Amino acid sequence: MVIARSRGTTEFPAQVQLVLAANPCPCASPAGDQHCTCAPAVRRRYQAKLSGPLLDRIDIRLALAPLSAAQLTTSTEPATSSAQIAARVAQARAAAARRWSADGWRLNAEVPGPVLRRAPWRLPPGDTADLRESLDKGLLSARGFDRVLRLAWTISDLDGRDRPGRAEVSEAIQLRMGESHAR
């Protein structure tokens, strides 16, 4: 882990995975829920407690909608087993390790942004048009831009693809911006 400050940079022998959970407002009702009693200003003030620099370091923002009793008890979709998910993740990590091993990296998360933005790893302009537009509009920082690229590579690896395309970049943007919802 690297800590950078104005007077210098220090590297610590650690890898950190930070997982955060937060309610969308003080009353803890899901966003847009009819039972929420919070005024819009109260919601904004509550959400503003997380600073921009902290939020800029969160790669995936996912809103989880509550399940109804009917959804929970009548699901007809077979659940994916932990073993199946573990195998898929192992294959994705192996693909990333093969791709980056010549440069000394094992994971997409370890690859510096400048490397992803130059040949041979730079994605075609058509695949990154939405990403560049988000940066130009100020919706993403330069750090966010690079994190979206890393996330797109990870999505591509999980899907068994050689490199991300427009769909993977779009999915990564949605996950980064908190526009994806899951149940």
Image (cartoon, helix red, strand yellow):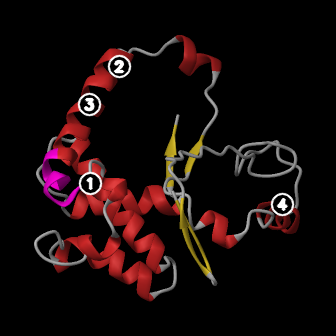
Element carrying mark 1: loop
- The residue wearing badge 2 is 80
Of residues 155 and 33, the one nearer the viewer is 155
Label 3 Cα crowd, 10 Å radius (few <14 / some 14-19 / many 20+): few
Amino acid on which the number 3 mark rests in the picture: Ala
Residue extent of the magenta highlight: 98-104
Q: Residues within 10 Å of mark 4 (few under 14, many from 20)?
A: some
Looking at the image, can residue 77 be seen?
no
The image quarter containing residue 178 is bottom right
| Label 1 CA crowd tier, 10 Å (few <14, some 14–19, many 20+) | some
Residue 171 at x, y = what percent? 35, 56
The reply to whether the magenta stretch includes residue 89 is no
Q: Position of residue 166 (x, y in %)?
A: 22, 64
> For the residues carrying marks 4 and 1, which lies nearer the camera in this image?
1
> Tag 4, which secondary structure?
helix
Query: 134 and 68: which one is in front?
Result: 134
Tag 3 residue = 90
Which mark sits nearer the N-terminus, 4 or 2? 4
Residue 105: which numbered mark, if any? 1
| Residue 132 in the image, given as x and y percentages of width and height | 34, 81
Task: Name the residue that disc number 4 marks.
Answer: 46
| First in residue order: circle 3 vs circle 1 | 3
- Mark before the other along the chain sequence, 4 or 1: 4
Q: Which residue is the extreme one toward the bottom? A: 136
Q: Residue at x 60, y 43 (%)?
A: 19
Q: Residue at x 55, y 11 (%)?
A: 73
Main SS of residues in magenta: helix
